[in-house]
Image (cartoon, rainbow, N blue to C red):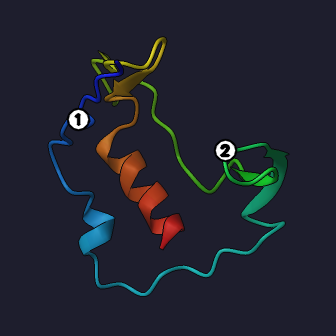
Amino acid sequence: MLKLVHWAPPRVQRVAAATLATNAPVAYERGRHFALLTREPGQQHSDLPIWVSSPEVIKYNTAAAGPVVRTDVPGVQGAFVLSNILSDDECDQINGVAR
């Protein structure tokens, strides 16, 4: 018998400042700031878009994040979540693009 386990991802320690900002969002343009990289099959749709941003859109700082923490997902063989991959500033930038 399959036992269902309720699992929740690790808690994030802060709310990104971009989600609380009142500034008007920047108008990002397809082809200039981001582009369609490919389409991948998913569980319910066979053509999920995978996007890539232009190099100048997100300013990454590899020394700012960490330490990286791995949390295994119980009941799903090989599945895990990595935390602390991005710095707070990088998360704010990504949230700004997503608005």
* Residue closer to the observer: 45 or 81: 45
- 12 to 73, vertically: above or below: below
Q: Is residue 85 left or right of residue 12?
A: right
- Mark 1 is surrounded, within 10 Å at the Cα level, by few (under 14), some (14 to 19) or many (20 or more) other residues, namely few
Which secondary structure lies at badge 1? Answer: loop
* Residue closer to the observer: 10 or 16: 10
Q: Which residue is mark 2?
A: 43
Q: Amino acid at mark 1?
A: His
Q: Quadrant of residue 96?
A: bottom left
Q: Which residue is outermost to the front?
A: 1
Spot occupied by residue 67 in the image (x, y as percentages of width and height): 27, 18
Spot occupied by residue 20 in the image (x, y as percentages of width and height): 24, 73
Q: Which residue is outermost to the top?
A: 78
Name the image quarter holding the N terminus: top left
- 56 to 79, vertically: above or below: below
Q: Is residue 38 left or right of residue 18?
A: right
Spot occupied by residue 88 in the image (x, y as percentages of width and height): 30, 45
- Mark 2 is surrounded, within 10 Å at the Cα level, by few (under 14), some (14 to 19) or many (20 or more) other residues, namely few
Q: How many marks do you count on the picture?
A: 2
Residue shown at the point (38%, 24%) measured from the top left:
82
Sequence-first disc among 2 and 1: 1
* Residue closer to the observer: 89 or 91: 91
Spot occupied by residue 65 in the image (x, y as percentages of width and height): 33, 29
Q: Which residue is mark 1?
A: 6
Q: Quadrant of residue 63?
A: top left
Which secondary structure lies at badge 2? Answer: loop
Q: Amino acid at mark 2?
A: Gln
Q: Between marks 2 and 1, how big is the CA–CA gap? A: 20 Å
